Image (cartoon, grey):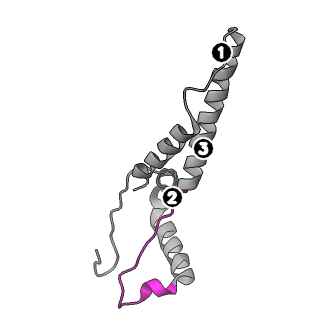
Amino acid sequence: MKTPDKFRFSLQWGSESVEKVQAGEFLEGLGNRKSEFVVLAVTEYLAVHPDVMSVSQKPQIVVKPSFTQEQVKAIVLAVIEEKMSGMTSVIQDAGGAVGEPAVTETDIDEMLKNLDMFSK
């Protein structure tokens, strides 16, 4: 909101991402100096992206996630493979025979495909 001698804004956002938590904690630490930092940050952003000042368009702000979908899939696959290898060694240590694994490569692929529902 603009008044005759200043601007006044109220901001809030959730804590569902690392970036939002980091930004919130940083601004909280600034105390009463938040306004000066926000002015500096917006000024620097506009210097790098002057096209957002175009009157004919509404600015498009795109937030990139911390991890890409491929990175998440790779992490999940690595954890599954680690757990599966641990299960095989436990069976061998117990003196049991190691047969076909209970989880197949196809099962893992199917599970990773189902992760798509979490990326939207």
The type of residue carrying mark 1 is Ile
The type of residue carrying mark 3 is Ile
Total number of numbered discs in the rendering? 3
Q: Secondary structure at mark 1?
A: helix
Callout 2 crowding tier (Cα within 10 Å): few <14, some 14–19, many ≥20: few
Question: Residue beneath label 2, please?
Answer: 65
Question: Residue beneath label 3, please?
Answer: 75
Decide which of 20, 79 is in the foreground and name it: 79
Q: Give the residue drawn at x 47%, y 54%.
A: 20
Q: CA distance from mark 1 to mark 3?
A: 25 Å
Question: Residue beneath label 1, please?
Answer: 91
- Label 1 or label 3, whichever comes before in sequence order: 3
Magenta span covers which residues? 50-68
Q: CA distance from mark 1 to mark 2?
A: 39 Å
Asked whether disc 2 touches disc 3, contact meaning CB atoms under 8 Å apart, the reply is no
Q: Give the residue drawn at x 66%, y 24%.
A: 86
Q: Residue 66 lies in magenta, yes or no?
A: yes
Callout 3 crowding tier (Cα within 10 Å): few <14, some 14–19, many ≥20: few
Q: Give the main secondary structure of the magenta stretch.
A: loop
- Label 1 or label 2, whichever comes before in sequence order: 2
Place of residue 120 in the rendered image (x, y in percent of width and height, measured from the top left):
39, 56
